[in-house]
């Protein structure tokens, strides 16, 4: 009898799960605009690809299968870009700048963003006399820091890097202060306290030659766990704040939402109009095998949660590794790790890079009935005529998504991944007539990107009127920026002071 009762209970639970409905309400509330997604042009022990440009050819550009648009490269601690690459462990000149040039040129040619991060300034500028971080017996455990009498040399050194890259046909978009200034290492590294970084930026960042190098942007140091003390020091100082364009950090040991580090840093950054970039993290890189599908979904959740935390760009670590985007060919991780072939994680990233880049995040709520554990995540975005909704489910069973939109939608498509073998399957969504509510079923353990087209007729307002002097009103995008040629969904402020939303194809 007990076994029968347990079976009945199990069947009831299963039936309840199969009847799950999640109400997803997309709101007309705007947050950050997403700059994009990318990875680092490194593999192995941070060695550049050199002439092997196949990874970036596979991953970058709007016509690629993945659609990445941001590439990170190391600014090695030397002065001559053509220095030959020495053996791993020679920290004074560990890598040359030339190694990343071929990949960087392709990314730039495809409309992408390339930025550089120093692991260390030149050793002669530092307290331990070497580019090494200093945490080793051979260095006597000397904490490698930038000598204060060399602060005035730091930005001129970055200018030599910018000059070199420009001479090779790559105009850099941004440079960072330092990789993980709070992590004492035995490889190439340099320590800064938040106060030391503030001193460097406040008093010397004006020496970065922005005029010569196409308005190159300055990225803050990138702390290991996105410690907001580093960015808050900069943003709370009006002089330093004017010099910094992007706040950056990593996620090691600090998920984007659970402890609040990234989210806290993003609050002050948004207040002052600064972008927030997650510039390095490896997900499940400590496994001796290829990631399974559950781990791919956890990766998708991390990217999604970065967006929820206010992030404007997500840059993964190595682009070529068995736990990354492109295979290495190492026999121990085969089958499935063919060199220079796309891996499942790349396709998972494409849900964001191909559909979310350039969009603005919208407010969205989800309510599950009946209530279960926290297994479902969603974000929503608007990009021109499209509303994009990301849905991530880690449960075995499927359910119905009951959507409610701020505008009527007339058509749609869903891009769905359900396993390492079934990735980015595109299916049209049947909508008979424009609606603001509809229900769509999705399977368990799935990642789905929905792209809905806003109904022009249902959203359009009459053409802007001219006043008696033949003048029209002023136009703004949905973030309040002035438009010279309005289009899509925008705000019109009439000559009489009235404000309204307008849709113009």
Image (cartoon, helix red, strand yellow):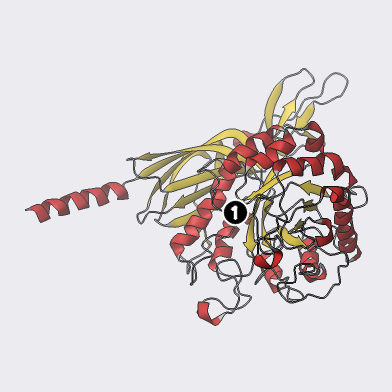
> As displayed, is residue 494 above or below residue 354?
above
Q: Nearer the viewer, residue 422 or 395?
A: 395
Most extreme residue toward the left, as rendered?
1
**Rendered location of residue 141, percent (x, y):** 67, 60
Q: Is residue 456 visible?
A: no
Q: Nearer the viewer, residue 63 or 397?
A: 397
Quarter occupied by residue 187: bottom right
Q: Nearer the viewer, residue 503 or 111?
A: 111
Left or right relative to 443: residue 382: right
Left or right relative to 365: residue 314: right
**Rendered location of residue 458, percent (x, y):** 59, 35
Q: Is residue 67 visible?
A: yes
Label 1: which residue? 352
- The residue at 62%/53% (across/down) is 355
Left or right relative to 61: residue 378: left
Quarter occupied by residue 407: top right
**Rendered location of residue 349, percent (x, y):** 58, 59
Crowd class of label 1 (few under 14; some 14 to 19; many from 20; radius 10 Å): many
Figure quadrant of the C terminus: top right
Left or right relative to 376: residue 85: right
User: How many numbered marks does the figure carry?
Assistant: 1
Most extreme residue toward the bottom, as rendered?
331
Most extreme residue toward the right, as rendered?
212
> As displayed, is residue 78 above or below residue 10?
below
Q: Secondary structure at mark 1?
A: helix
**Rendered location of residue 76, percent (x, y):** 79, 63
């Amino acid at each position: 009898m007990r076994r029968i009762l347990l079976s009945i209970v199990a069947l009831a639970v299963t039936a309840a799960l199969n009847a799950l409905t999640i109400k997803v309400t997309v709101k007309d509330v705007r947050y950050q605009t997403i700059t994009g997604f990318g990875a680092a042009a490194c593999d192995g022990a941070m060695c550049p690809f050199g002439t092997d440009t196949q990874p970036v050819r596979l991953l970058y550009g709007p016509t690629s299968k993945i659609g990445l648009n941001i590439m990170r490269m190391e600014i090695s601690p030397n002065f001559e870009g053509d220095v030959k690459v020495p053996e791993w462990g020679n920290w004074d000149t560990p890598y040359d700048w030339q190694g990343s040039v071929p990949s960087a040129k392709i990314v730039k040619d495809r409309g992408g963003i390339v930025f550089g991060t120093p692991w260390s300034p030149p050793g002669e500028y530092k307290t331990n006399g070497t580019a090494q971080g200093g945490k080793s017996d051979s260095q006597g455990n000397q904490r490698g820091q930038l000598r204060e009498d060399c602060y005035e040399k730091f930005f001129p050194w970055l200018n030599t890097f910018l000059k070199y890259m420009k001479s090779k046909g790559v105009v850099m978009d941004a440079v960072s202060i330092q990789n993980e200034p709070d992590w004492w290492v035995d490889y190439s590294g340099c320590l800064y306290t938040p106060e030391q970084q503030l001193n460097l930026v406040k008093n010397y960042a004006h020496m970065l030659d922005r005029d010569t190098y196409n308005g190159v942007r300055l990225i803050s140091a990138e702390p290991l766990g996105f410690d907001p003390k580093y960015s808050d020091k900069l943003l709370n100082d009006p002089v330093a704040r004017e010099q910094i364009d992007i706040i950056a950090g990593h996620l090691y040991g600090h998920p984007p939402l659970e402890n609040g580090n990234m989210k806290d840093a993003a609050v002050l950054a948004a207040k002052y109009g600064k972008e927030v970039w997650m510039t390095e993290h490896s997900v499940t890189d400590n496994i001796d095998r290829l990631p399974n599908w559950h781990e791919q979904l956890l990766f998708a959740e991390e990217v999604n949660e970065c967006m929820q935390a206010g992030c404007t760009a997500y840059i993964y670590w190595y682009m070529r590794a068995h736990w990354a985007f492109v295979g290495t060919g190492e026999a121990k991780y085969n089958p499935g790790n063919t060199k220079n072939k796309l891996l499942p994680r790349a396709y998972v990233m494409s849900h964001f890079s191909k559909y979310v880049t350039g969009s603005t995040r919208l407010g969205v709520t989800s309510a599950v009935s009946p209530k279960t554990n926290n297994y479902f995540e969603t974000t929503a975005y608007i990009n021109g005529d499209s509303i994009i909704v990301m849905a991530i489910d880690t449960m075995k069973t499927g359910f119905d998504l009951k959507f409610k939109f701020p505008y009527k939608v007339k058509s749609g498509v869903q891009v769905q991944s359900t396993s390492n073998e079934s990735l980015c399957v595109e299916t049209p969504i049947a909508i008979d007539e424009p609606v603001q509510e509809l229900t769509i079923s999705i399977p368990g353990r799935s990642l789905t990107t929905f792209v809905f087209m806003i109904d022009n007729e249902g959203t359009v307002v009459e053409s802007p009127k001219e006043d008696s002097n033949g003048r029209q009103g002023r136009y703004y995008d949905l973030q309040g920026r002035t438009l010279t040629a309005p289009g899509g969904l925008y705000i019109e402020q009439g000559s009489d002071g009235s404000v309204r939303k307008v849709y113009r194809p």
